[in-house]
Amino acid sequence: MKLIINADDFGLTKGVNAAIVEAMNNGVVTSTTLMVNQLGTADAIDLIHTHKLESIGLHVNLTLGKPVSEPEEISSLVDSNGEFHSRKYLTDNADKINAEHVYIEAMNQYLNAKSYGVDIDHFDSHHFAAFLPNLRDGFIKFANEVGLASRRADYYIEDIQALAVKTTDKFSAQFYGERANIKGLKDTILELKGSDNETTVEIMAHPGYSGDELASLSSYTTQREHELSVLLSDEIKSWLQAQEIELIDFKGIK
């Protein structure tokens, strides 16, 4: 089996950024996805260039902070303050969202990252919001036009045939919360492992250092430190070798 471990939320805070860099340089994280409109975005971009990080994706964000587009361009995605609606709002009101607004904002976030010299090579979505009904039409249009690899959508639904870009064969979001421990990561991997050594899978991770800044933005705080300790552990590295699991990034999928 070929395994991608992707760290979401790069750019959320400096503490999250530091943990992701550590997990990529010294642990088993093989790729990360960048948020371009957060407090830690400038720091993340600096770290990408300083550490010459590769396999950087775009964490398309439709639920936190202000958009990079002008609010009037994407009016269905923002509230009266020009900030993104909450994830709950999008879930409850997906039919009111203009899919073209999702396309516009995703494309502008991608172009924003590129303008800072970041070589984006894959996509996913914060809170999986871009895969919600109706919103996904805009995301698919964006992803297909750019043509880079994408996270699979079957966290919510069966794989989307209209998404005509590379994806892994399988995806799991189960390394999270109460499973943010060594046993939880092993169990998640074993649930995905098949008999075919060429099977490619992606596991989502959220390493980070907690703090007041993170607590103001996310309810997932100290658990990120638990994830980091697992992703850095020698036990996991040795176990992956014993299981003959090859760590790859998105450039390694067919």
Image (cartoon, rainbow, N blue to C red):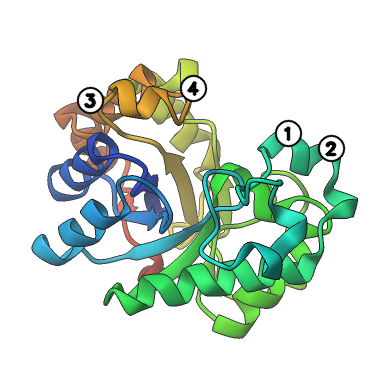
Left or right: where 154 falls relative to 178: right
- Of badges 2 and 3, the one in the foreground is 2
Q: Which amino acid does label 1 sit on?
A: Lys
Q: Find residue 98 and name its label.
A: none
Q: What element carries label 2?
A: helix
- Of badges 3 and 1, the one in the foreground is 1
Closest to the observer, 227 or 133: 133
- Going from N to C along the chain, the mark reached first, 3 or 1, is 1
Left or right: where 239 falls relative to 173: left
What residue is drawn where x is 45% and y is 31%? 217
What residue is drawn where x is 39% and y is 36%? 206
Residue 57 vertical position relative to residue 207 in the rendered view, above or below: below
Which residue has dot 4 on it? 219
Counting labels gives: 4
Which residue has dot 1 on it? 88
Q: Find residue 92 and name its label.
A: 2
Which residue has dot 3 on it? 229
